[in-house]
């Protein structure tokens, strides 16, 4: 089931999310809903607070080529345990900040640990777009958005645009 995506500014997008203590059918259903919502948007990553659930859960799939197999990843309690000194710049966007994009510099390579959909501990090294995406999504769990990396003027400009968009949506 698709879920509505919260649009910035929203207090739920600024919260530090709670760890998931035990996997339940409800949480698995939430993860499946988030993947469906992400693919439908379409996007390459989504964090639970973006659908109003302040739990440490993200989903992502950065496979972009048409011919390539999709690779949906579900991560409960994801954690970056090591990151490279080498950095990468990507033009980032966010489903909670539609149609706004900006360059963000992040570590190029990160080691991430998480609990998968079946409750198993996983660890993997991510590079390139995957590394950027997983860091962007984990930031969401700490109440941080990609616009928080920008200067105050740019951030405020984007926030005002989103306030206007939300007013228009409320009227529609
Ligand atoms: Ni985002």
Image (spheres, helix red, strand yellow):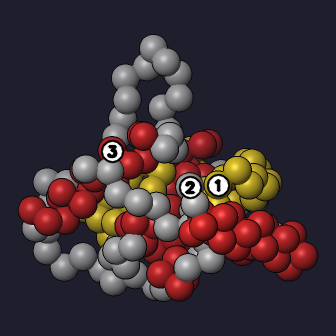
Residue 64 placement (x, y as % from top left): 53, 29
Instruction: Label 3: state its secondary structure.
Output: helix
Do callouts 2 and 1 mark residues in contact (Cβ within 8 Å)?
yes
Q: Residue at x 53, y 85 (%)?
A: 11
Please give the residue where the numbered disc 3 appears in the rendered image.
Answer: 36
Q: CA distance from mark 3 to mark 2?
A: 13 Å
Give the residue at the far left of this rendering: 25
Residue 151 visible in rendering = no
Q: Is residue 66 above or below residue 1?
A: above
Q: Is residue 155 above or below residue 68?
A: below
Q: Residue at x 61, y 42 (%)?
A: 128
Viewer-proximal residue, 20 or 13?
A: 13
Instruction: Label 2: state its secondary structure.
Output: loop
Viewer-proximal residue, 40 or 128?
A: 40
Q: Is mark 2 within 8 Å of ligand 1?
A: yes
Viewer-proximal residue, 7 or 54?
A: 7
Please give the residue where the numbered disc 2 appears in the rendered image.
Answer: 95
Which class describes the residues within 10 Å of circle 1: few (<14), some (14-19), or many (20+)?
some
Q: Quadrant of the C terminus?
A: bottom right
- Residue 161 in which image quadrant: bottom right
Give the residue at the far top of this rendering: 67
Do callouts 3 and 2 mark residues in contact (Cβ within 8 Å)?
no
Q: Is 130 situated left or right of 72 in this image?
A: right
Viewer-proximal residue, 54 or 52?
A: 52
Badge 3 or badge 2: first in the primary sequence: 3
Please give the residue where the numbered disc 1 appears in the rendered image.
Answer: 98
């Amino acid at each position: 089931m698709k879920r509505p995506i919260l649009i910035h500014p929203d207090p739920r997008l600024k919260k530090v999310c709670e760890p998931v203590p035990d996997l339940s059918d409800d949480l698995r259903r939430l993860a499946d809903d988030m993947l469906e919502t992400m693919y439908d948007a379409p996007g390459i990553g989504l964090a639970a607070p973006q659908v109003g659930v302040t739990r440490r859960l993200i989903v992502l799939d950065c496979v972009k080529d048409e011919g390539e197999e999709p690779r949906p990843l579900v991560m409960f309690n994801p954690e970056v345990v090591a990151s490279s000194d080498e950095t990468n710049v990507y033009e980032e966007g966010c489903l909670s900040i539609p149609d706004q994009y900006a360059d963000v510099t992040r570590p190029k390579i990160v080691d991430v640990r998480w609990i998968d959909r079946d409750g198993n501990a996983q660890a993997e090294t991510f590079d390139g777009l995957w590394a950027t995406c997983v860091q962007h999504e984990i930031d969401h769990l700490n109440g941080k958005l990609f616009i928080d990396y920008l200067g105050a003027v740019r951030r405020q400009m984007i926030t005002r645009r989103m306030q206007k968009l939300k007013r228009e949506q409320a009227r529609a």
